[in-house]
Image: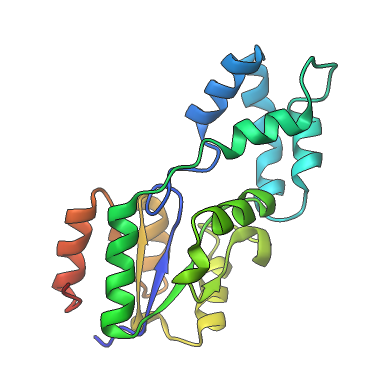
Amino acid sequence: MTTKALLLDIGGVLLTNGWDSASRRLAAEHFAIDFADMNDRHRIIFDAYESGKMTLDEYLNLLVFCQERDFSMQEFKDFMFGQSQAYPETIALIKQLKQQYGLQVIAVNNEGRELNEYRVSKFELKSFFDIFSSSCFVHTRKPDKDFYTIALDLAQVKADEVIYLDDRLVFIQAAQQLGITGIHHTTTENTRLAFAEYGLKV
């Protein structure tokens, strides 16, 4: 196998998840919002936001500001963005692999545009990503097979020329049906060992 590119999830791999259930629960507690109601709304509308078919303001107007609040939308956004943290060891590993083997690095993440753009800027992801094939830009989400084929087309590589890293096994299994080799990320060290099995040793 000749590896030319890495397809990388971001949330749960390089950074914490951008807006997961734990973050939503914290927001509900912080702003005294009914979590169950907010979560029900989230499940209905979040696909549209992640697929780039709804702005963050539109999403939050339906999620939180569907009724009068004693806090501003900007205050809520600041809290939302503030949940993101980096995993420096995994980022360092990917940078080493890219430099040592001359690999393309392509983001394949489900994320809304404003949150994605904030995280790319905040954590300087442009310094080692070549392409951002994020759901908000390509208007489809994992595990839709079109999502993976678009990423391959953008990188101009074949399925058997990439390794895909994700913390969610079901997404890897979806990609494997297209002939893409996947690594299930659990810890940085396990991922390092998995890459080594494919000849990418650092």
Task: State whether residue 1 is above or below residue 132.
Answer: below
Horizontal side, residue 76 vs residue 190: left or right: right
Task: State whether residue 137 is above or below residue 152.
Answer: above
Which residue shows up at 45% across the image and 49% down it? Answer: 11
Q: Quadrant of residue 135?
A: bottom right
Q: In what quadrant of the picture does the C terminus appear?
A: bottom left
Q: Looking at the image, what colour scheme do you see?
A: rainbow
Horizontal side, residue 52 vs residue 179: left or right: right
Residue 19 location (% of width, % of height): 55, 38
Q: In what quadrant of the picture does the N terminus appear?
A: bottom left
Which residue shows up at 45% across the image and 55% down it? Answer: 10
Q: Nearer the viewer, residue 37 or 90?
A: 90
Q: Nearer the viewer, residue 79 or 2?
A: 79
Which residue shows up at 40% across the image and 80% down it? Answer: 159
Task: State whether residue 18 is above or below residue 138.
Answer: above
Count of marks overlaid on the render: 0
Which residue shows up at 59% across the image and 40% down it? Answer: 81
Residue 29 location (% of width, % of height): 57, 14
Residue 34 location (% of width, % of height): 65, 13
Residue 183 location (% of width, % of height): 28, 62
